[in-house]
Image (tube, rainbow, N blue to C red):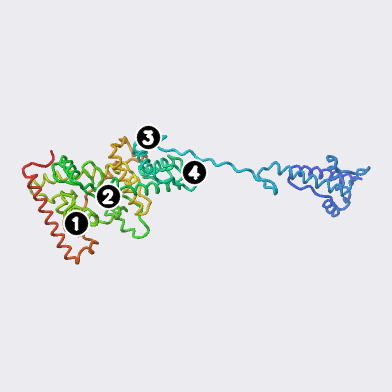
Amino acid sequence: MYANQTAMFTAVVGAAVLEFAIRQRRVKRPTVATDAAVAAAAEGMAVEWPIVAAQAAGAHDPNVQGDAEGNIDPLTARNAEEVLVEEEEEEEEQEDPLMVVPGRHRRPARPRVYRVRMSFEALPDITCRRRLRFSRETVAHICHLLAHLAPLGTGGGHALPVSVKVTVALSFYATGSFQAPSGHLSGISQTSVHRCIRAVTDALYSIADKYIKFPEDRAQQEARARGFAKVAGIPMVQGVIDGVHVPMHPPADNREVFMNRKGAYSMNIQVVCDPHMKIMHVCAKYPGSVHDAYILAQSFIPAMFDGCPPRLRGWLLGDKRYPLRSWLMTPIRRPQTNAESRYNEAHAATWGVVERCFGLLKMRFRCLDRFGGALQYRPDRVGRMVVVCCALHNIAMQRGDDLVEESEGGPDGTGGNANEGGGEEEDVEEDDDGAHQDEGRGAGHRHCSRAGYVQEAARRHRRGQRARDVLVATRFTHCGGGIR
């Protein structure tokens, strides 16, 4: 008797624990066949344990039917258990909206939300000058120049307008930082910034010849000569020439070719400007190890003065890294007379226009300055960016768009003095023979032999020496020229 009561109590407690576990969805409600198999393995509990469990389940379910003594039909209990399991599974499916059920539709996708694209039109004029280095009117003019281009898609569903592309590109040119920070101003991704910079650079490069040109008509030549003569009195000056290094990340092959004399990787850019610091010529295709004299010899500048007849009457002013020519005046090394000293002073004052041009160019476009970091592009892309920056510089000079004075740091707060980004300082003393050798390096295809080229260079140097002596004798002997 005592054993039967203990078994009955154990069965009731087990049924309650099982029902609690089923309601917590931790186990699946057992069927009658499973109960019978478990009970058959236990001695003396083949009838009581499954019957009590079924009664506990049937007491709460009106679908379960039993006889007058309370015994439940095993088939009826099996059907009742299956119904309860199906109902619980349906409840779970209704509670979990992420469950994928065959025959039912998935949850509708959320609509795509595009970030707000900002352009220069939403910026005040002072902010536009500081962030883009141009006024709003000048940026609008640049957008008008590129309005003929088709809308350039960025890979998504919406194509960015021209105003956003120009804003992103000018922000990159002005700061010289990585592409991702440049996209924060307009709210676009780094990939879109890359496409915008490439598209705007190629578009401006295609029209750069309209803004970078060397006027050859007589009126323009006389106007340039008068402008340079006002600086220090040197007559017939048609331009000042110098080279500037733009830092860049070197390519994988031929890295040593891009290392300049200071141990940094760069491209050597040749620039000629007028007395108003407007760029008339730019050559941006030679690595940093190439000498200035060689770049000049390979450009079209000599043909403009040595032609028959010459297209330009006068001369250029260059520093001591250039060879002396009848159309290229360089400073006198080791001056012996007061006239030669006054000539060097006037030459330095006039030639300094190109240095100020470099300072203004690198102040406006930090991507060309070492403080903005090296450009992470191929050499041909760097050359295109340099030409585009020179064209934008001329547009700003033509429209009278002055830079905003920076009290501290650059437009991105990185600091640095813009004047330090000018031309390379002359820390290497060279003689005329060294300049001749650098000029003729790699130019053997123009002459039959090395000896013939050396003779030709010496002849040109003598002609330049005579022209410079005449200039010194006529303008600086009796204090008639020089700095006033």
Q: Position of residue 430 (x, y in %)?
A: 18, 55
Q: Earlier in the sequence, mark 4 or mark 1?
A: 4
Circle 4 residue: 158
Q: Earlier in the sequence, mark 2 or mark 3?
A: 3
> Is 292 situated above or below 88?
below
Q: Which mark is residue 282?
A: 2
Identify the residue position indicated by label 3 in the image: 127
Mark 3 and mark 4 lie on one chain; the one further toward the N terminus is 3
Q: Earlier in the sequence, mark 4 or mark 2?
A: 4
Lower position in the chain sequence, tag 2 or tag 1: 2
Side of 391 where 454 appears, left or right: left
Is label 4 in contact with label 1 (beta carbons under 8 Å)? no
Which kind of residue does numbered mark 2 sit on? Val
Residue under the point 75% across and 47% down:
27
Q: State how far apart marks 2 and 3 are (Cα).
A: 30 Å
Residue underneath mark 1: 435
Q: Quadrant of residue 365?
A: top left
Q: Are marks 3 and 1 in contact (CB under 8 Å)?
A: no
**Splitting the image into 4 quarters, where does residue 366 fall?**
top left
Which is more foreground, mark 4 or mark 2?
Answer: 4
**In the image, what residue type sits under mark 4?**
His
